[in-house]
Image (spheres, grey):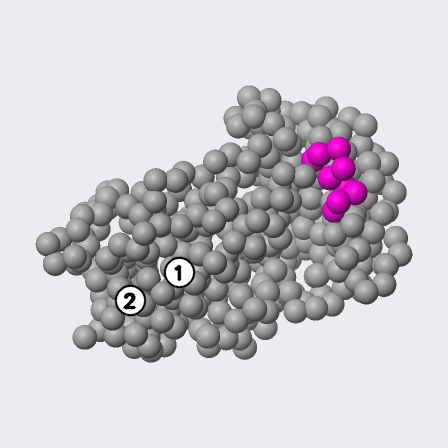
Amino acid sequence: MTPRIAIIGGGPGGLTLARILHQQGIQANVYERESDRLARSQGGTLDLHEDSGLLALRAAGLAEEFLRIARYEDQGSKLYAQDATLLFDDDGIATGDRPEVDRAALRSMLLDALPPEAIHWGHILTGLKQQADGRWNLEFETGTAGSFDLVVGADGTWSQVRPLLSPYRPQYSGISFLEFGIDDADHAHPQLAKLVGAGKMGVEADGKGIIVQRNGNAHLRGYAMFRVPLGWIPQRFDLAVPAAVRTGLLREYAGFADVFLDLFRASNDQFAVRPLFALPVGHCWQSRKGLTLLGDAAHVMSPFGGDGVNNAMHDAAELAKLLLVNADLDSAVAEYEATMFKRIVPSASGAADAVATLLSHDGQALTLEMYRSFHATPVPA
């Protein structure tokens, strides 16, 4: 019999799982708390990796569609000193198998690859109840759904499914981002577009940093980075008044070259606070009938290394593969979990190391060393 599967969360991981299953005739139900696909910003750009994100897209039969939204030309990196001295630049040199794609474009592609009835918008999960036969009913603010043979928590950092499997909660890393954006940079702010180049730029000094990424449609998405207590940014900046936020950023980054301050002056009025949280390296749980997790719900980590979405999509591909070849649902899930726990450790360890040294006294030197290690010969600044 075809199992009834519910996926909580309509991000790239959950949608990839639903798409692969759909190709094989299994209609999974995706429950998403947002009211529709345009309900909120999906964030900036990300790079998909050959052995994870791109592998998953091939399994989903979407490799050709992905080429229409991928930006292979935007894989460059620039690193600056506080006075705007260029320390590293592979802009126009960098090539490889990690194409950039806007998160919103990736999500839209995955949504379009599923039948509309597979996505249930506006469903905020409030609880799960297990029946006597081991199946699960879902409780939402708007009603109930069920019963399901398998519920997959793909609902991110603050997963509502995770507490049924693990007592661990994500812990604050000590790093918070203040996100900002610059519109139509190539035409309205050509000098800033040149500063960022085809990819991303970074600068770090005095316990603060700035990262700016090139997104599609000539949009620049930036992050002012601080090592501060949780809640410091809302206390320090009047987020309800965009002009006051810009003034505050100019104050906090006094001492940085004026060209970096121009990034804040050019920003639009959309600001967002992004504190970084992570689960412990090696996070795992005892397998439980009819439940599992993928992506950030299973192993949220800092974004450094770019593995977050890639890990989620890889999880989805591996889980789908095992569900399709193993008639014993519980056995398939247990095998997926055991393999995933081991596979994620190097990625989580690398992310933990990166966030531990970010904004430290030698953080910029370590970043420069990492960039140079990507090339067989040094790339001149």
Q: Which residue carries the number 1 mark?
A: 338
Q: Quadrant of the N terminus?
A: bottom left
Residue 139 in sight from this viewpoint: yes
Q: Amino acid at mark 1?
A: Ala
Query: Disc 2 and disc 1: Cα gap in Å?
Result: 11 Å
Residue 134 against residue 86 in the figure, above or below: below
Disc 1 residue crowd, few under 14, some 14–19, many 20+, Cα 10 Å: some
- In the rendered image, which quarter is residue 47 located in? bottom right
Residue 126 percent coordinates (x, y): 26, 42
Which residues are drawn in magenta? Answer: 358-367
Q: Secondary structure at mark 2?
A: helix
Q: Amino acid at mark 2?
A: Ser
Q: Is 238 left or right of 159, judged from the image as shown?
A: right
Please tell me whether residue 363 belongs to the stretch shown in magenta: yes
Q: Which residue carries the number 2 mark?
A: 331
Q: Residue at x 17, y 51 (%)?
A: 130
Q: Residue at x 59, y 65 (%)?
A: 49
Q: Is 2 left or right of 178, judged from the image as shown?
A: left
**N-terminal of the two: label 2 or label 1?**
2
Residue 192 against residue 111 in the figure, above or below: above
- In the rendered image, which quarter is residue 175 located in? top right
Frontmost residue, 57 versus 266: 57
Q: Residue at x 21, y 62 (%)?
A: 149
Q: Residue at x 47, y 43 (%)?
A: 279
